[in-house]
Image (tube, helix red, strand yellow):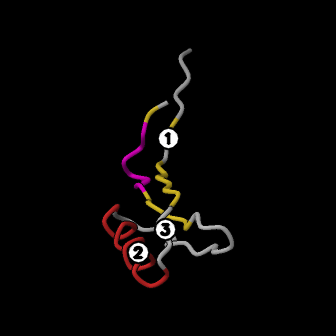
Amino acid sequence: IRHVPDGGVTYEAFCATSGCGEESGPQEGQEEAQQWCLRHTGRTGHDLFRRVVTDHARVTREE
């Protein structure tokens, strides 16, 4: 199983404050997701986030 660079990588942040539910949505760069967290914290005071990094992988079978 190997990372496929052509598929790209996405970064997302989810506010982990109970009852909030706001999220950054998929971002192409880690910096954009982090900036969303900073803006959200400034606006709401919420300071706990779940971060998700998604990539694409290809499985190659050996015969």
Of labels 2 and 1, earlier in sequence is 2
Q: Are marks 3 and 2 in contact (CB under 8 Å)?
A: no
x, y percent for residue 8: 40, 55
User: Residue under circle 3?
Assistant: 26
In percent of the image, x 40 and y 74: which residue is there? Answer: 36
Label 3 crowd bin: few (<14), some (14–19), many (20+), radius 10 Å? some
x, y percent for residue 9: 41, 55
Q: Disc 3 and disc 2: Cα gap in Å? A: 11 Å
Q: Nearer the viewer, residue 52 or 50?
A: 50
Can you say whether 8 is above or below 37 in the image?
above
Q: Is 7 included in the stretch rendered in magenta?
A: yes
Image quarter of residue 63? top right
x, y percent for residue 23: 55, 72
The residues colored magenta run: 3-9
- Numbered circle sitting on residue 36: 2
Q: Amino acid at mark 1?
A: Ala
Label 2 crowd bin: few (<14), some (14–19), many (20+), radius 10 Å? some
Q: Are marks 3 and 1 in contact (CB under 8 Å)?
A: no
Which label sits in the foreground, 3 or 1? 3
Q: Disc 3 and disc 1: Cα gap in Å? A: 18 Å
Q: Amino acid at mark 3?
A: Pro
> Disc 2 on helix, strand or loop?
helix
User: Residue under circle 1?
Assistant: 57
Of labels 3 and 1, earlier in sequence is 3
In percent of the image, x 44 and y 53: which residue is there? Answer: 7
Q: Residue furthest front?
A: 45
Q: Is 29 included in the stretch rendered in magenta?
A: no
